[in-house]
Amino acid sequence: MSRARADEEEYWHSSKFRAFTFDDEDDELSQLKESKRAVNSLRDIVDDDDDDLERVSWSGEPVGSISWSIKETASSSTSSLEGRDSSLQKGSSSYAAFPKQVSSYSLSSLFKGELCLSLSALSDTGVKNYAPELRRPKADYKDYSSDWSPKDTVRRMQRGKVCSLERFRSLQDKLVLLDEAVAGHDGNVITAVMLTYFTHLKISLCPVEILFRELEVRQVALCHLIHFLKETGEQKLLLDLLRLCFFSLSFQLSQYREHLNIQDVEKRREFLKGCIGLPFSAEDTSHIQDHYTLLERQIIIEANDRHLEMAGQSEIFRKYPRKASILNMPLVTTLFYSCFYHYTEAEGTFSSPINLKKTFKIPDKQYVLTALAARAKLRAWDDVDALFTTKNWLGYTKKKAPIGFHRVVEILQRNSAPVQVLQEYVRLVEDVETRLNLATKYKCHDVVIETYRDLKDRIQLTAYKCKVERGSAEEEKINSILNNMVRNSY
Amino acid sequence: LSSGRVNLTALREAGRRELREFLDKCAGSKAIVWDEYLTGPFGLIAQYSLLKEHEVEKMFTLKPGRLPQADVKNIIFFVRPKLELMDIITDNVLREDRGRSPQRDFHILFVPRRSLLCEQWLKEQGVLGSFIHREQYSLDLIPFDGDLLSMESESAFKECYLESDQTSLYHAAKGLMTLQALYGTIPQIFGKGECARHVANMMIRMKREFPGSQNSIFPIFDTLLLLDRNVDLLTPLATQLTYEGLIDEIYGIQNTYVKLPPEKFAPKKQGEGGKDLPTEPKKLQLNSAEELYAEIRDKNFNAVGSVLSKKAKIISAAFEERHHAKTVGEIKQFVSQLPHMQAARSSLANHTSIAELIKDITTSEDFFDNLTVEQEFMSGIDTDKVNNYIEDCIAQKHPLIKILRLICLQSVCNSGLKQKVLDHYKREILQTYGYEHILTLNNLEKAGLLKPQTSSRNNYPTIRKTLRLWMDDVNEQNPNDISYVYSGYAPLSVRLAQLLARPGWRSIEEVLKMLPGPHFEERQQLPTGLQKKRQHGENRVTLVFFLGGVTYAEIAALRFLSQMEDGGTEYVIATTKLINGTSWIKSLMEKLEPAPF
């Protein structure tokens, strides 16, 4: 079945038959068989690898597919020049543009305008293409009359037909036409109408204020214009428009988006500073304010640290040279950086982690996670310890982790902490089952043994004996506990 | 393509015909310069051989600089109407050596439509006059499979919902007119959503304005169902669990092709053993022409393994038969089956490898955790508070798209998030991934994927219960309900299609009102001679058009409904783009400039 289908596919791919015999099933079938035979015999000659049904190059592109052929023909591109006359082509363009009359139906004759000339083509070649008129249906004769309603005009434009927009002179007429275009949902036409009447590609034909007043009530058209200006990089008009569009959040964000195009950090910072004043929603304003403050901070840190690194005085920079600049990095990355290089600095300095935490109101959880990852990477276990130690007012110390000790263990383990360090934190995991799992997974034998002891689980403890090294201190410990348990239970 | 209820080869043939007509207009030898994005879709219409028959000798990809030397009479640009592409073309044309003889003629073919904007742009650059033919090729609906059409318009959803640019809807309506020209007027149109309403209006208007399009073809489709993607924002966000859906989620299927890591596809022949392992990704075409793939593509992944092993047994048994072949006749028969068997074997080998690759991922802890959270949300558990798993993923800097998918899913399943929860997520994302993502978050809010809860009422549970979106007793091996495609969640969009067929939407008026956009019904009059007299037991054919994209899992669910014995309806699916949660969210993200280092 798949064979037959594949063959049929093959037939379509290699078909030389131009006419599609639509209603004549039998004929098509016999042709199919015939062509199948031909194709098959052909393949025997061309193709000696019969493993697959279809010829496929290694990259999987069937041989003969378009993307495969591009590579093929491009690589075998020849560069010979040959005399061939082409002088006739120029100048006769408008005539050559008429499609041939199609015998049976085709998609093009159904919906596409027979005369595919657009506004711009109109001004190129003039409206004097009357000759092909003769071949077109009667209804199209009024193509060249000039009294279409705005509605008709838009319809014609959608079909790519010639139409004159010059007769819509008054602003009112133009706006009616624009509304029609918007109702037609065809962005192509909407933009064309906008461009013809209200702006030219380079200059605004009508004062921005008037343009804007009319577009304010025509949001769809406005979106199209803004989109177009963005695409063409028409900054001045775009920003003029945006300034007038303060009522809507999305337009302010468009303005904010501009900062991404500014490569120079100082200029970018200045630009962001300007954005803070825009009337965003309350939370957005605070985020943008933070963005600005962060970049400002990063510029200071970067200058400072580059200097330190170059001077070669600071040990940490010598030992762990920076991989990239900190500019434009996210806040958490910046915090990590500062925990890595500037952990011990006093709160007053811009680069200290505590300062970052306070300035940006970084939640405890986030802060601890980041600091832990950074200090663990440096294998500064004392700092790790200090991170979780709290003193109460009596002077007793207590271990506390806002992220849960199982997470602490995971992070430490990922930074290949030694077992001694690891088990200290495994022991602090509250949930017994999680603790046992982690301890077993990371071979913290002492913790496993103690936990089973506390659970008074003889069976598990005995079973665990085979997991520890023979003759080791752990084995001894298990044995002594087992002995104690026996004694106690009698 | 011809295997389905509706023979889509006719559509492809119409496309080829139009292409041939254009090529013949440019007399003489030709070279085509391709906008690379178009080669995939065009590959589904025509092969190189067709172009070659029409004197296309060379093909290049479009890039700035001088055009490669090629001794041809015509240079044809096949491009989408995009301004940045116009700039490249301008560059190509300006650098063309004017002194060379013979001079080459330039033509331009816009796909899918000519754009006044682009032509104006070319004119400004002073090169418009260089083009002899400037035409359009309306590649609206491309046949992907026997029952699947796509416009492959990547940004359709974004344009409709973020930029209020409905040009893609206009193209959808045009594509539907083409379909009607080939397969007859569709008598009944149902729809749900703003965009659906627009498309239906345009279709009706176009029909009125082209009285000539009143055709005399017996209608093949009984019903058209137009669905807005934003009626069901939930479904694409969830991880698809069908075989094809997972291939797409993990590796991404482009124009029926998928690229896979090559390690598992090492050449099996002895002779090639000396060569190194291939390093280029392995590219495979996936469609129902492959017998095995047609059988497993729409199954839940958990049911794929058993099919593969069953097939393996059958094939090895078939190969064993050669020992029993005694007479010359028997041997001859065996040999004649050999090519088919070998094809089946290589297809089996490929899919076993793919299944292994996928299994590595689906059995990972993270995949499981992610799925658990998704399923909790969809069944309505803890959707109103900050989720621990999401927080952990942010802390570990998992890919942003994954985070956004989960948060959007939570928001949709809770009819919006509590302001506090939303603010918390936003803050975490901006601090961890960078403040510039405020733009992306804003886009998601605009599209309705992420929003604060406005009323205190959460409609999702009502919708879930009425439409039976969550099924606890799901059968993955032998499904009895569409919910198998997400192992429990029944895609809302497909449920709407199912309920429309039986018992009709009147039974769910209340829920329809809770979903965004209007719902409607239109009838297109048929000439009396063409009205269908239904044979007893004959299935109805419904075309479901997803405006804004459809996932493979939804397609699988519709195919499942087509195959139900007492279903009574067969479905053909059309869409603006085949999507999955990742590609969809990506299309809504702001394209951020790459970091400057």
Image (cartoon, coloured by chain):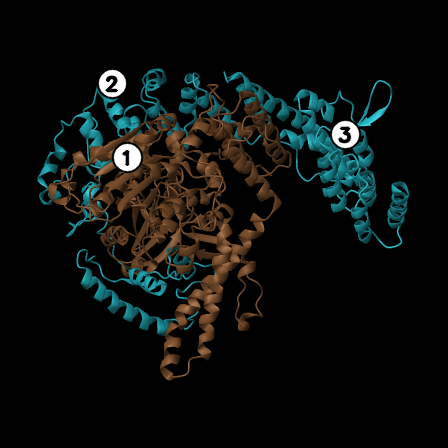
Chain colours: A cyan, B brown
Residue A318 at x, y percent in the picture: 78, 39
User: What residue appears at the point 46 percent right and 30 percent down from the top-left corner?
Assistant: B449
Real-space CA distance between mark 1 and mark 2, rounded to the nearest whole angstrom: 40 Å
Q: Nearer the viewer, mark 1 or mark 2?
A: 1
Discs 2, 3: same chain: yes
Looking at the figure, which quarter contains the N terminus of chain A?
A: bottom left
Give the labeled residue for mark 3. A343
Q: Is residue A87 left or right of residue B216?
A: right
The disc numbered 2 marks a residue on which chain? A
Give the labeled residue for mark 1. B190
The disc numbered 1 marks a residue on which chain? B
User: Which element is circle 3 on?
Assistant: loop
Kind of residue sitting beneath label 3 = Tyr
In the image, residue B202 above or below residue A238:
below
Residue A171 shows which numbered tag? 2
Q: Quadrant of residue A313?
A: top right
User: Which element is circle 1 on?
Assistant: strand
Q: Is residue A143 visible?
A: yes
Discs 1, 3: same chain: no
